[in-house]
Image (spheres, grey):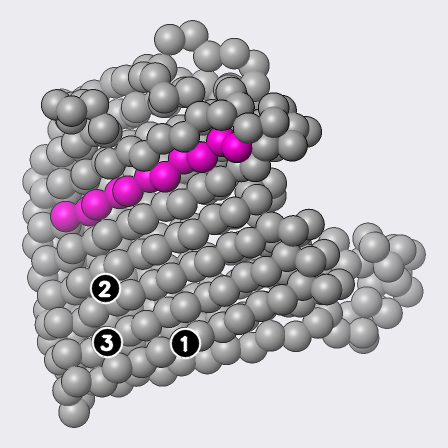
């Protein structure tokens, strides 16, 4: 399938791609396969029922990547896609996902992606998921991602979740279970504006000795938008868990932070932090003395905060 200029722009926004990547990839545009490439170590197969793909990464695979971006440029599309990742023992790979929606019509466009990861012993994954919305239509841009992670002993996963612009409604749910020595790091960056709504839920279970999780969200709520951050870490063994929400509230925005910890073992070390506040006045004044307008100073502060 040949992609048009809008679809190519969306691919660049959510996956950082301006040309076809060298590694494995699967491009999806308006509910159709737009391109696929496999490698000797990474195989991509469509599910028999057509609901998504299976990505199998051979044990020991190093320095390879998988790109699986999704773009919607037609109004009125609603789809649910199931993608399963099987990462072999000792593999070390980068997986780049994400969805971009350009809606210039009157009907809502929605993509719900369910990504399930199965990491074998010692596997290492860096996972990047970006969401982006554009278009001047009255139809909404809706994204509801679900991520489920099963981590074997001594595996590690670093997740970067980014949503900065244009998504009217999103409900993100991330679930993870970790065996002994497994390590999970999650970094979320989120900005809402207008009447947008965003819910981020994290459920992490530390089941093995030495397992650790670090879940940190940074967000900005502008105009009359609403955000809810709901993170729960359960420690069922000698382990370490940390969750943090750091947010800037502006205009008439609203933010609800719900950090939760559950210790089921005497040697479970769990910590949570939450901070919500407006931009400090002295920061604005300092930048304005350098010649920036108040609006320019706000943008500089927000960009640095979400970087």
Q: Nearer the viewer, residue 12 or 22?
A: 12
Residue range corresponding to the magenta coloring: 108-118
In the visual, does 6 lie left or right of 47? Answer: right
Q: Earlier in the sequence, mark 1 or mark 2?
A: 2
| Residue 223 x/y as whole percent | 72, 56
Q: CA distance from mark 2 to mark 3?
A: 14 Å
Which residue is at the far top?
A: 2
Q: Quadrant of residue 234?
A: bottom left
- 111 magenta-colored: yes
> Which residue is at a point 16% across and 91% down the rendered structure image?
266
Q: Nearer the viewer, mark 1 or mark 2?
A: 1
- The quarter of the rendered structure image containing the N terminus is top left
Q: CA distance from mark 1 to mark 2?
A: 20 Å
Q: Quadrant of residue 219?
A: bottom right
| Residue 111 x/y as whole percent | 41, 35
> Which residue is at a point 10% across and 58% down the rendered structure image?
152
């Amino acid at each position: 399938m040949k992609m048009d200029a809008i679809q190519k722009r969306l691919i660049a926004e959510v996956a950082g791609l301006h040309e076809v990547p060298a590694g494995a990839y699967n491009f999806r545009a308006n509910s159709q396969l737009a391109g696929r490439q496999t490698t000797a170590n990474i195989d991509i197969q469509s599910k028999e029922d057509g609901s998504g793909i299976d990505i199998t990464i051979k044990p020991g695979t190093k320095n390879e990547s998988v790109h699986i971006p999704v773009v919607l440029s037609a109004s009125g599309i609603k789809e649910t896609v199931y993608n399963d990742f099987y990462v072999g023992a000792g593999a070390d790979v980068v997986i780049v996902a994400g969805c971009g929606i350009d809606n210039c019509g009157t009907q809502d466009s929605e993509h719900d992606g369910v990504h399930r990861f199965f990491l074998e012993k010692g596997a290492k994954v860096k996972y990047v998921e970006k969401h982006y919305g554009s278009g001047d239509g009255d139809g909404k841009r809706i994204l509801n991602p679900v991520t489920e992670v099963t981590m074997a002993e001594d595996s590690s996963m670093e997740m970067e979740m980014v949503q900065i612009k244009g998504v009217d409604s999103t409900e993100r749910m991330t679930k993870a279970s970790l065996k002994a020595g497994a390590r999970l790091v999650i970094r979320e960056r989120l900005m809402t504006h207008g009447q947008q709504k965003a819910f981020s839920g994290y459920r992490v279970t530390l089941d093995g000795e030495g397992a650790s999780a670090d879940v940190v969200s940074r967000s900005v709520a502008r105009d009359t938008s609403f955000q809810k951050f709901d993170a729960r870490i359960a420690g069922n063994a000698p382990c370490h868990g940390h969750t943090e929400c750091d947010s800037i509230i502006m205009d008439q925005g609203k933010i609800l932070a719900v950090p939760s910890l559950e210790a089921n073992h005497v040697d479970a070390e769990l910590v949570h932090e939450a901070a919500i506040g407006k931009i400090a006045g002295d920061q604005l004044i300092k930048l304005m003395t350098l010649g920036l307008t108040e609006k320019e100073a706000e943008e500089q502060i927000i960009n640095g905060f979400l970087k």
